[in-house]
Image (cartoon, rainbow, N blue to C red):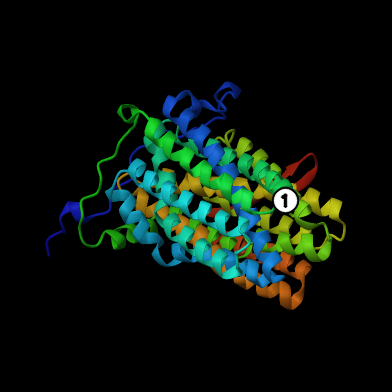
Amino acid sequence: MSAPPSATLPPPTEPLPVLTTRPPWRHTFIALSVPNFRLWTAGNFVAMTAGWMQRIAQDWLVLELTGSAAAVGLTVAMQFAPMLFFGLLGGVLVDRFSKRALMVVTQSVFAVLSLGLAALTLSGAVEAWHVFAIAFATGLVTVVDNPARQVIVSELVGHRHLRNAISVNSSVFQLGGMIGPAISGVLLLAVGAGWAFVVNGVACGLVVGMLALLRTSQMTRTTPSARGRGQLREGLAYARSKPTIVVPVLLVAVYAVFGLTMPVLLASYAADVFDVGAGGYGLFNSMVAVGALTGALLSTRRATIRLRTVVLGLLATGVLQAVAGLLPGVVPFALVLVAVGLASLLFLTACNQLVQLSSNIGIRGRVMSLYVLVLLGGQAIGGPLMGGVVEAAGTHVGMVVAGGVPAVAAAVTALVLARRGQLTLQVRVRHHLPMVQIAAR
């Protein structure tokens, strides 16, 4: 039997520059030396801050309208369910069309949806089902927007600074996550949720303007994939064939279902456990973001990324989150949230970098759509699941489950990889104390 045409085979990973030593401090934000990426980062910061404002306001609005943590979980599910069902198709579109053009469309639709929700809220006509419907519509647009947002970074900076650009992007996202909830908490107390939705709508319009200002002549444009059969299967087969793609994707899937349900858990902690209201809810989210921003900055200093990096990252994150569920006081709880945010971001950034650097640019849209599918689609499952756990067993149990299950998944993954010879356990003596380490063979 003759071999199939080469055009039908998954493209190999192109050689990419890999750091072997920590970069000098002056190169911590080296990707910002690229003019297009500087412009992108400025627009992205505004968008991320406003997006976090809307997410916090949306969740709190549903809690006010229904008084139910499960309803907040349903809101999360409605927003992320489209990615679960249609996410891989979004990756096919991203590989076929201009990422910049796709984002102009998606951000314009986001602006319309946000301003529509603002109008309903400010007029006093909003009901819970309105929020659910707009959250679902937002999720449909995210199916295309999120993989396009991931892949366009490589077009802006090229391969040389891709790892640094991913870390900078994560820093911007978390900086927005630190500032946005705090601003949203103030707005919720002062004028209500509606104005947070207005701000997000305006911010999406500004992103459209930023995309129009990008210098396309300086972008590393990729040739769009030709329309053809089997492109979805090709992307899945490519991802499945590489441990450096499939293992991070599986671990992110587990963490998304359980660990990334923090809006549901923190809303319940603010309303039912500590009775600190909307301001406390915003504060808790900001504490997570403070740690995550620190983790994002530390990720720019990381010299190497291997499978053990993501396994240990998830183990640490899960253990810290489970510990948070056992703490009785608001101050120690808030402080541990900083550590959870730091560990979580180091884990997620390592997964993102490893998956992107392990995939060829010609198929990266489909690979990243798989990554985004489990990242966001997992939250669609986890939102109502953890909302039900909170209502049935209590908020503290919910937090322990949210961290404990990912920690167990990381430990099992380490054992499986060890049996396959990809990881080993080593015991070393340091300062006269035995230390257990996971090492790659």
- The residue that disc 1 covers is 282
112, 96: nearer the viewer: 112
Coordinates of residue 90 in the picture (x, y in percent): 36, 57
The residue located at (56%, 38%) in the rendering is 46
Coordinates of residue 306 in the picture (x, y in percent): 52, 46
Query: Is residue 122 rendered to the left or right of residue 358?
Result: right
Based on the displayed image, in which of its 4 quarters is residue 230 positioned?
bottom left
Q: Can residue 74 be seen in this view?
A: yes
The residue located at (20%, 51%) in the rendering is 226
**Of all residues shown, which one is farthest toward the left?**
2
Task: Judge the density around disc 1: few (<14), some (14-19), many (≥20) Cα neighbours within 10 Å.
Answer: many
Residue 112 against residue 17 in the figure, above or below? below
Query: Is residue 108 rendered to the left or right of residue 25?
Result: left
**Of all residues shown, which one is farthest toward the bottom?**
392
The residue located at (51%, 56%) in the rendering is 116
Q: Can residue 417 be seen in this view?
A: no
Based on the displayed image, in which of its 4 quarters is residue 233 positioned?
bottom left
**Of all residues shown, which one is farthest toward the top?**
26
346, 44: nearer the viewer: 44
Query: Is residue 79 rendered to the left or right of residue 335?
Result: left
173, 360: nearer the viewer: 173
The residue located at (81%, 54%) in the rendering is 333
Coordinates of residue 321 in the picture (x, y in percent): 72, 58
Coordinates of residue 17 in the picture (x, y in percent): 41, 33
Residue 410 against residue 74 in the figure, above or below? above
Residue type, label 1 = Gly
Secondary structure, mark 1, is helix
Query: Is residue 286 rendered to the left or right of residue 225?
Result: right
**Of all residues shown, which one is farthest toward the front?**
123
343, 306: nearer the viewer: 343
